[in-house]
Image (cartoon, helix red, strand yellow):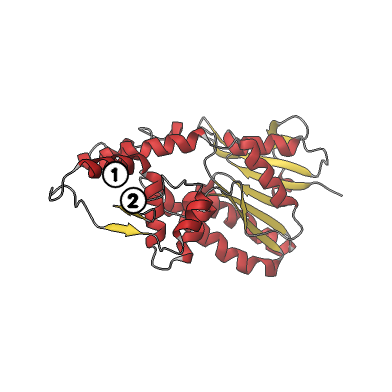
Amino acid sequence: MDPTVVLITGCSSGIGLHLAVRLASDRSQGFKGIGREERSGGQGRVPRVCNAGRGLFGPLEAHELNAVGAVLDVNVLGTIRMLQAFLPDMKRRHSGRVLVTASVGGLMGLPFHEVYCASKFALEGLCESLAILLPLFGVHVSLIECGAVHTAFYEKLEGGLGGALERVDAQTRQLFAHYLRSYQQAVSEAQDPEEVTEVFLTAIRAQQPALRYFSTNRFLPLARMRTEDPSGRSYVAAMHHKAFSDLQAQEDAKAGAQVPGDPDTASSAPICLPECAAPRVASELGWSASDKPGQDKSCYRQ
């Protein structure tokens, strides 16, 4: 049986590179990995083939390009271009897999990541729509939902994380400083690319592929909250608490020190989790009794 030809986008580093090497060294020899990487000298994106067992790159044969059986889209900026290039042939052959690297940012909003989350939300909608249609052509679409992963993603950002905040108001910059502490905590607990690679392999080998595969379950309670409370208030409250937990602690300490009648006390109205949801959600998120949102353990002040 001929090996499945797998096209991997963005394989010069990070998850894509780990995938290329992993498929090349797969003991079953069931895959032939093709990578697309950025090349210098004005040549643009050029297909390169990953030689089995060595993780090396060489020229791609034309017949291999026409026989791609699976697209593993790591460089999601090219998702639509990849689909336009390879879906028609997959549909004609009535066979194919499309696996797209998604993100927690496509399932929930993250402060200071507005444009990033918007692009990921769009990706979720695109893939979910295709996943309903394409099985009629023997083609399956799966999203690999990732949390934080140890890659050079933020190192490649022009100006670094928060670089676009130079001209915003002082309060927003201060809030970003508080958020950065939560972000740094999340990064310290990030997954290795190898873990995500194994999820890709599970999806590509599945006889009946699912729409979503999660590399981590840590954020699922928050994601579920978006639909369990139609008003969205529970979700906003929990996300605010998670993103600005140190700010909340400071506000609680300040409120305890203020005297009745102090005009600074009423900073804003509290937003509360429904009483029936707060204990369960807090338990799933691993919050202790002392760090649930707000003094009554179901509210916080925004």
For disc 2, the neighbor class at 10 Å (few under 14, some 14 to 19, many from 20) is: few
- The answer to whether 266 is drawn above or below residue 130 in the figure is above
The residue sitting at 47% across, 60% down in the picture is: 225
Observer able to see residue 231: yes
Q: Is residue 9 above or below residue 156?
A: below
Cα distance in 3D space between marks 2 and 1: 8 Å
Q: Which of the two discs, 2 and 1, labels the residue nearer the N terminus?
A: 1
Q: Position of residue 244 (x, y in %)?
A: 35, 43
Q: Mark 2 and mark 1 in contact? Answer it, CB < 8 Å.
A: yes
Q: Label 1 is placed on what type of residue?
A: Asp
The reply to whether residue 66 is visible in this rendering is no
Question: How far across and how far down the image is residue 60, in percent?
Answer: 69, 39
Q: Label 1: which residue?
A: 252
In this rendering, the answer to whether 65 lies above or below 51 is below
Residue 297 locus on image (x, y percent): 39, 53
Identify the element where label 2 is drawn.
loop
Residue indicated by mark 2:
295
x, y percentage for residue 87?
64, 59
**Residue in front for this viewpoint, 289 or 21:** 289
